[in-house]
Image (tube, helix red, strand yellow):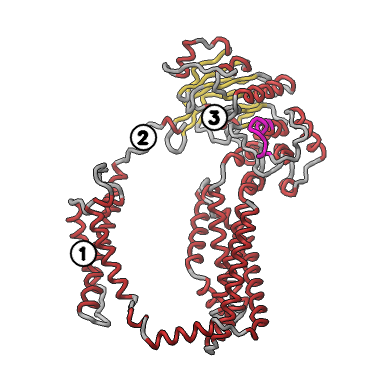
Amino acid sequence: MATQTERLPHEPTNMQIVRKTAQAFCLDVFLMAYVILVTHKIIYEKIILGLRYPDFNWNQPMTALGIGFLMAVALFFTKFSIGKAVFGLYEDDPEKTVLKQPYTLLGFLILILTIIAGIFISQISIREFLSESGLNGARRIFTALFHPNLDIFEPALFAAIETIYMAFIATIAALPIAFILGFFAARNLMADSRFFFSIYVLIRFCLNMTRSIEPLVWAIIFSVWVGIGPFAGMLALSLHSVSSLAKLYSEQIENISDGPIEAIKATGAHPIQVVWYGVVPQIVLPYLSFTIYRWDINVRMATVIGLVGGGGIGTMLMQYQGLAKWNEVGLLVLVIAAIVWVMDYSSSKIREAIK
Amino acid sequence: MLEIKDLQKVYPNGTHALKGVSFNVTKGEFLVIIGLSGSGKSTLLRCVNRLHEPTSGSIVFEGEETTTKRGKELRSLRARIGMIFQHFNLIPRATVMTNVLSGTLSRTGIFASIMGNYSVEDKEKAKKYIAIVGLTGKENSRADNLSGGQQQRVAIARALMQNPKILLADEPVASLDPATSHSVMKYLKKINEELGVTVVCNLHFLSLVRQYAGRVVALKDGKLIYEGSPLEINEEWFQTIYGEDAVEVTIN
């Protein structure tokens, strides 16, 4: 069927070329404006003039955009346009590899500029890294860490168990919600009608939003909402798990083969039966594997979330760190490392076994 | 029992797969559709049970217009039409029994089918059809552990569970070796002759066509170009259907 299309798929239409040119041009304008801004604001004002707080007003980026526009126009007629290269508007030259093209040179220039600016902004300083007082402090902490205080082993263990349970419940609570959302976030199931497709877009958007906010931030929000403690941590992990799992699930659904679905449809089955017999058997094992992996991630994250009052071993760690009791911190770090190692090992073994 | 009139199908990407195809299928016959890949054979079969939506034209099945059916009516139409596929399309990781029983989904309730509660008669029937396709003893094996030919026989048993009036077979032997191909074709012939199920089958190999077909229609570029007995396809017709350069390949 598809082999007999009238037009070859590789031959771009005029419309596509116009669109690609516009996109390439926008990219060039953006890159040029970036180069001008970085050179002026960081290389010139911060590094050369040594200003701590240089003046800023919105005219500067606007001017940069304007100059960038002019430079992009000029670049467009040369072989230096990165935009044209990215969108494939240069003719292929079999003699020259990508690394030998003029536009690659410009790309390297931008990369070096960014590295210089980045080093300056990160305030990298070898002198402080190797200063005497600094090294002494580090030595003090490391010695304490390597002499863990075994007296608090029991409370640490209980806190660790609390963390594992919290992560487990967070995963279990996320599971059914993610399971259902996964179907609605799968393109191949939702593309049939405009109504379902708009639901798909909406759900995808919400999932991406919640996923892009770190669980640490969610834990802060929930600790205000339900009070400091394991419950806030669980809610934060749960929310993040829902969005991550739903995305993984939906990608799994998008990868299933259409064959069994077609066959079950052909028997006259109801759409729910089609999902149960055509879709579900193809996704059960990957789902299980993702979920176990998620539990593993949640245990690791739960220790971090404890730092902002999410309960468990993380909160304990935070308290001892605040009191500068490094021997106790040393023990807690060991316990956390042990849990993470055990979880990592067992989850990978289980996932291997159910493949 | 099946009348196809001026059937047209244009895919959303602009491919004109069927350009006004008309023919009839009479009850109890073994009709084979031949043609090159891309000639519209698969599309034609999928339009009959509406896995693909026809763009225009009419399909009348047992006196009922099918192209306008929706929802429950469409599902009951599909239930009366069995279908088997080139890649078998069995439920992965499920047993032979579960796969065969999935042919009864349209008459089993949604909840019962999710719980796996099938009626006793259906289970008996499933055993009977598994025996007919020669797989007794394999009921509880995982279907995806069987060989290709055995998997296609499971698919035939699944289609038979629907009590179909007609069986559509889309390239049923295209991914099987020659010996297995014959075995699967023999089972199709058997259910055509012994159970009286009308069979409409897409095939590639003319040698299989001559051996099993009662009647042949040929498609080329979405148009019907030949209709008649399989034995009347001579060299000249062969080249019209498959193109000037084609050489006939036989499988024994």
Give the residue type at disc 3.
Answer: Ser
Q: Which residue is mark 3?
A: B42
**What distance separates the C-alpha of mark 2 from that of mark 3?**
22 Å
Task: Tell me residue A34's x, y (percent).
Answer: 26, 65
Element at badge 3? helix
Name the residue: 27% across, 61% down. A30
Mark 1 falls within which chain? A
Residue type, numbered disc 1: Gly
- Dot 3 falls on which chain? B
For the residue pair B119 and A104, the one nearer the viewer reads as A104
Residue segment shown in magenta: B143-153
Q: Which mark is residue A8?
A: 2
Residue drawn at the location 56% of the way across and 43% of the way down: A257
Residues marked 2 and 3, same chain = no
What chain letter is assigned to the residue under label 2?
A: A
Residue B247, given in percent of the width and then of the height, sits at: 47, 16
Q: Which residue is mark 1?
A: A66
Find residue A299 and report its horizontal and vertical position in percent: 60, 70
Q: Is residue B177 left or right of residue B162?
A: left
Magenta stretch holds residue B147: yes
Foreground residue, B197 or B125? B125
